[in-house]
Amino acid sequence: MVVLDVWADVVCPWCYIAKSRLRRAIDAWDRPHEVLVRQRAYELEPVLPKGRPVSVNTYLGEKYGGGEEAGAAMSARAARIGEQEGLRFDMAHALKANSYDAHRLVALAREMGGPALEDAALERMYSAHFAEGLVIDDHDTLLRCAAEAGMDERRVASVLADDTYGDHVRSDEAEARSLGVRGVPFVVANGRVAVSGAQPVEVFLELLRVAAQPPEVATPRER
């Protein structure tokens, strides 16, 4: 069995791309049924005020410099690569928003339906943000997206009404800090071999191969 702990943020385009590539690697491996993926929460901007979305291009231009034009260029590069993976990006309308509540719902999805529902919920969040220009911290939007992913609306509404599963988010982020994670995506296989970034499918396949070997045989490596 290979257990993959994947730290990611639902507003990170490279995390969306890595999710697609990792799935392709798992499907191409000779033992895909022996791989368990566990999604772990990571907020790139935890202090971003809720209810105050801003254009992703504007946000990137202000954070890294160069203004909105430079931000649009960064977005366009990620979108081009994502579209090669068969993902849909509409960065001109994407809105940067706080991702804390989205992470809480992904944790709820895992409890409600295991890895399959967790994956469906995460995929729906990515699509909402990158393809549909939806505000990912709006509770009505989150409720609708969760329901479309197959989650129980009453349970979702109950979680959104308080801070349930907030401890899951904080625990994941604390573990990431203990591992020295400073950016996502970040994948740890069987707790001993790590890969950072939206690596090619071949790199994720190597990760699976190395992690599947006995600890005394495998040579951990980090990229």
Image (tube, rainbow, N blue to C red):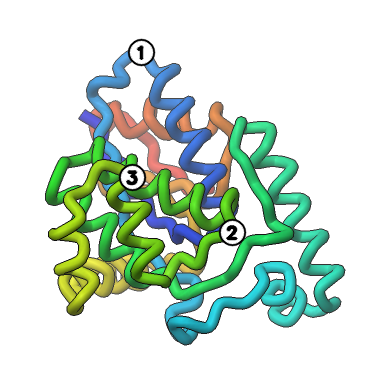
Residue position for label 2: 133
Q: Position of residue 48 (x, y in %)?
A: 49, 83
Instruction: Classify residue 168 as left or right of residue 122.
Output: left
Q: Earlier in the sequence, mark 1 or mark 2?
A: 1
Amino acid type, callout 3: Glu
In whole angstroms, how far apart are the C-alphas of marks 3 and 1?
32 Å
Residue tagged 1: 30
Foreground mark, 1 or 2, reads 2
Query: Residue tagged by mark 3?
Result: 148
Taking the spot 68% from the left edge, 76% from the top edge, the residue there is 59
Q: Quadrant of residue 219?
A: top left
Distance (Cα) linking label 2 and label 3: 16 Å
Mark 3, secondary structure of its residue: helix
Tag 2 secondary structure: loop
In the rendering, at what x and y percent does residue 42 appear? 39, 66
Q: Residues within 10 Å of mark 2 (few under 14, many from 20)?
A: some
Q: Is residue 192 visible?
A: no
Left/right placement of residue 220 relative to residue 217 reads right
Q: Is residue 172 above or below residue 209?
A: below
Give percent across and percent down for residue 208.
Answer: 38, 30
User: Which residue is rendered at x = 68% and y = 32% of the image?
Assistant: 84
Give the mark, 3 or 1, whose residue is nearer the N terminus. 1
Whole-angstrom CA distance, mark 1 to mark 2, is 37 Å
Packing grade of label 3 (10 A; few <14, some 14-19, many >=20) is some
Q: Quadrant of the N terminus?
A: top left
As rendered, which of 213 and 89 lies closer to the eye?
89
Tell me the kind of residue under disc 2.
Gly
Seen from the viewer's position, the closer of residues 71 and 192 is: 71
Residue located at (25% from left, 36% from top): 116
Q: Amino acid at mark 1?
A: Asp
Task: Using the rendered image of the protein, determine whether residue 63 is visible from the camera's viewpoint.
Answer: yes
